[in-house]
Image: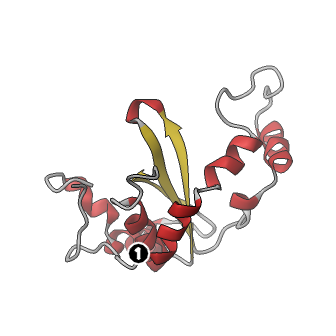
Amino acid sequence: PIECGPGIALYFKEFYEEIARTRLSDGGVFATQSGACGLINYHEVFTTIHSTCRASFQHAYGFCVDIPSYGCPWGFNMAYNTCAYPDAPNWEPSEVDKRLKEALKDYDTKPLASYDGITHRSMFALHKSVRQGLEKETRVMTKDTPVFLT
């Protein structure tokens, strides 16, 4: 979030709680981009957004993907209160591949270019420093306590 943008409100605890209470279907999953999560910049907003998700939902999982045009790994968070697949972040690569084949009829002839079971596992396998940062983070973003990129 940047200070001058109206999108900052999309990262407040008040917004997440509203989503959880009135918009998210039973068993639904909320996901949000959460800023850079490389070794030198995860602390800027990724940990705070994760902490805010943890404070707003019963379950929150941080993950990251490489987005070359961003120049660093980019973080996301998924959060939910109830979910049909609560253990999805911990699925074995073979389980992810099996589910992809079941869900995508032409998966064998037209596989996904950037996602498979091993990629899934790597997305949730955050670097130890990042995981420690998530555990230590106490800031929660609210309209009265916003956190901005500096």
Tell me: 145 left or right of 112.
Answer: left
Residue 72 image position (x, y, % from top left): 43, 40
Residue 2 image position (x, y, % from top left): 21, 53
Number of marks in the image? 1
User: Which residue is situated farthest in the left direction here?
Assistant: 4
- Pointer 1: residues within 10 angstroms few (<14), some, or many (20+)? some
- Colour scheme of the picture: secondary structure
Residue wearing tag 1 = 17
Q: Is residue 7 above or below residue 104?
A: below
* Residue in view at x 69 percent, y 41 percent: 119
Quarter holding the N terminus is bottom left
* Residue in view at x 58 percent, y 75 percent: 81
* Residue in view at x 45 percent, y 79 percent: 55
Helix, strand or loop at label 1? It is: helix
Residue 28 image position (x, y, % from top left): 59, 63
User: At label 1, which amino acid type do we have?
Assistant: Glu
Q: Is residue 32 above or below residue 27?
A: above
Tell me: 39 left or right of 105.
Answer: left
Q: Name the one closer to the observer, 45 or 60.
A: 45
